[in-house]
Each structure stands twice: as structure tokens, then as C-alpha cells.
Image: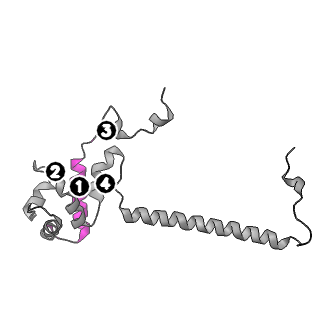
Amino acid sequence: MTTQTNSFKSLLHEDVPPECDVYHKFCQSVNVCIRRSGYSRAQLADRMNYASTNNYQVDETKLNKWFAPSQAVQMPVHLLSSLCWALQSIEPATILLSPLLFLPVDKRAQMLQKHAELQMGIEAMKKDQQSILSELSQAAPDSPQFEVSDFIEE
């Protein structure tokens, strides 16, 4: 029998691995992102080199080999963050994490979501406050609207 906590267990802790063969999907995603980015492959290579702090040099030929599914040469994983920055998209990282049902989310997006949640809370409290004020203004000041017996349970 599965307990409540086990039913929400992360795929990272499962005994059976998910289908993690996503390289072709990853290559396809990168190629789509390249077309959408407006940068040439040479420009993307330059952007990746600019973002990369190690001395690994990316060029157009390497990009062509890495993202052609028929090629055996694959991009080194330590260049993923510079690739995402160069493409201005986290879609490639999303594809790689998708078998585990994880999404990369940036800190700014988390803060914007928290801000929106707090703003909704503020609006709900203001609405409650207005409702209370409305009830108070309708009641005659010398006659109580509620009797003590309204609050006593028998």
C-alpha cells in the first residue's frame, strides 16, 4: 500500500528510471532556438565564448556538429549555461530536465510570482475591510446589530 508521502515522491528517488534519451529532442530544440534568436551560428559561438569562463573555444563548425543529430560529437554539458545565455532561452535546459518532471525557473520569475500572490492577498484583505466598513456604516450606532446570543452556542 502506498502512503501519502510516497505517492508524491520525486522521480529522482524512483527505482525505475524515466526515459532519459532526449538528445534528439534537445538538438531539435536548440536548432529552433537558434532560428528564433536572430543570431547566426558564428554570432552564437561568439556569445558562448564571451559567456564561458573557461578557455574552451566554440566556433560555428562545433555548433554544426553538436546539434546535428546524425553526428556522434555532442556539446560538453558544462557549456549549457553559456548556450542558454547565448540563445536567450532556457528551453534547451528544460528539454534536458523534462524526463524528471523538473523545470528550470529563474529567481526573477519566482519573485514576480510571489509579488503577484502578495498583491492578490492585499486586494482580498481590502475587499474584506470594505465589507466590514459597509456593515458598520449600515448599523445604527445606538442599537447593536448583533446580540450576545448570536455568538453563544447551545
Are dots 4 and 1 in contact, CB under 8 Å? no
Q: Is residue 31 magenta?
A: yes
Q: Nearer the viewer, residue 100 or 108?
A: 108
Is residue 139 shown above or below 80? Answer: below
Q: Which residues are magenta?
A: 20-41
- Residue at 48% across, 63% down: 114
Whether residue 85 sits left or right of residue 108 in the image: it is left
Name the amino acid type tagged 1: Gln
Helix, strand or loop at mark 2: loop
Helix, strand or loop status at disc 3: loop
Is residue 36 part of the magenta span, yes or no?
A: yes
Image check: 65 left or right of 104? left
| Chain-order first, disc 4 or disc 1 | 1
Q: Residue at x 32, y 48 (%)?
A: 98
Residue of label 1:
28
Q: Which residue position holds label 4?
A: 94
For the residues bearing labels 3 and 1, Cβ distance under 8 angstroms: no
Q: Residue furthest top?
A: 1
Q: Which secondary structure is most common in the magenta stretch?
A: helix
Instruction: Give me the C-alpha separation between circle 1 and circle 2.
Output: 8 Å
* Numbered circle sitting on residue 69: 2
Quadrant in which the C terminus is drawn: top right
**Front residue of 35 and 84:** 84
Q: Amino acid at mark 3?
A: Pro
Q: Residues within 10 Å of mark 3 (few under 14, many from 20)?
A: few
Residue 42's spot in the image, x, y percent? 12, 69
Mark 1 in CB contact with mark 2 (< 8 angstroms): yes
Cα distance between the residues tagged 3 and 2: 21 Å
The residues tagged by marks 3 and 1 sit, at their Cα atoms, a distance apart of 20 Å
Q: Please report contact status of discs 4 and 2: CB closer than 8 Å, yes or no.
A: no
Which residue is at 86% across, 70% downward? 139
- Specify the quadrant of the image occupied by residue 17: top left
